[in-house]
Image (cartoon, helix red, strand yellow):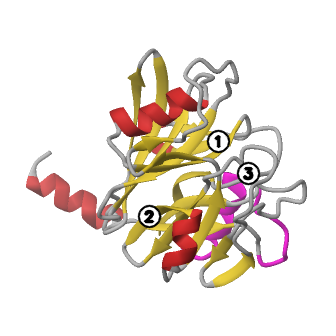
Amino acid sequence: MTKLASLILLMVLGPVPLMAETCETMSFKENSFDICTVDLTQDTLELFLYAPDGSPYGYFNTLNAALETKGKKLGFAMNAGMYHDDRAPVGYYLENGSELQRVISSEGPGNFGLLPNGILCLRGNRADVIETTRFLSQNPDCKSATQSGPMLVIDGKLHPRFLKHSTSRYVRNGVGTSADGTQAIFAISNNTINFYDFALFFRDHLKLRNALYLDGNISRMRAPSLSRNDLGFGALGPIIGVVTEK
């Protein structure tokens, strides 16, 4: 495109918002994944649960429509942690400084209670996956946060209770963060996968030292650049996504 054509396009469409999120499909050990990498130094990554009327947003399209009334739009998005039947979060949930659920540090049933679990903490221009007991001792000043479990990777080691040949296989999604906190890498498997292989993908392929499982079976992703916008069969609880100007 010539400089003149670019200038005309800019005059017609207006400035194009800078988006650092990048999404792609990749394979690792005969498994397929869609991943989105969010650059916290450029992208605005936020958590969402309840609309102003108190009902859960539930779906990516509902959340996007609400953002559009404010002159914004939703880019990448994903379900962001486990929730009860009423869509309330199972573990710690903090949204723009407002705490909706306290930290749960005790062992319990299901994947969430398969300790160690962890918390995704958003603060300023960084995001960090932090193991729960370490989170409690460090008490980081998060703007928003969501707890889920189990941890997939803890300081470069796989969760100690994962079995290499486990037959428990689901479509799963999770998130890992770079050591400097500037990148959050979200992944969803495109085929059913066990915990061990999913964790291995984060550690050995994405080279992340800390990663957190978000959920399985109900896992969904919105990735406009991949023409992906999962609807699912029911409303979600917490949602995490990149927000840009419309």
Which dot marks residue 113? Answer: 3
Distance of mark 2 from mark 1, alpha carbons?
21 Å
Magenta segment boundaries in residue numbering? 52-71
- Looking at the image, is 101 positioned above or below residue 57? below
Q: Report the label total.
A: 3
- The first of marks 3 and 2 along the sequence is 3
Q: Is residue 215 left or right of residue 17?
A: right
Distance of mark 1 from mark 3, alpha carbons?
22 Å
Considering every residue shown, the one lying at the far left of the view is 3
Mark nearer the viewer, 1 or 3: 3
- The first of marks 2 and 1 along the sequence is 2
Distance of mark 3 from mark 2, alpha carbons?
20 Å
- The first of marks 1 and 3 along the sequence is 3
Q: Is residue 7 left or right of residue 36?
A: left
Which dot marks residue 128? Answer: 2
Residue 192's quadrant in the figure?
top right
Considering every residue shown, the one lying at the far top of the view is 30
- Proximity of marks 2 and 1: CB atoms separated by less than 8 Å: no
Which dot marks residue 220? Answer: 1
Residue 136 coordinates in the image, percent (x, y): 58, 75
Mark nearer the viewer, 2 or 1: 2
Viewer-nearest residue: 78 or 158: 158
Instruction: Residue at 69% x, 47% y: name it.
Output: 114
- Looking at the image, is 160 positioned above or below residue 181? above
Residue 161's quadrant in the figure?
top right
Quarter of the image containing the N terminus? top left
Residue 105 coordinates in the image, percent (x, y): 69, 65
Q: Is residue 246 magenta?
A: no
For label 1, the crowd category at 10 Å Cα-Cα, with few meaning under 14, some 14 to 19 and many 20 or more, is many
Residue 13's quadrant in the figure?
bottom left
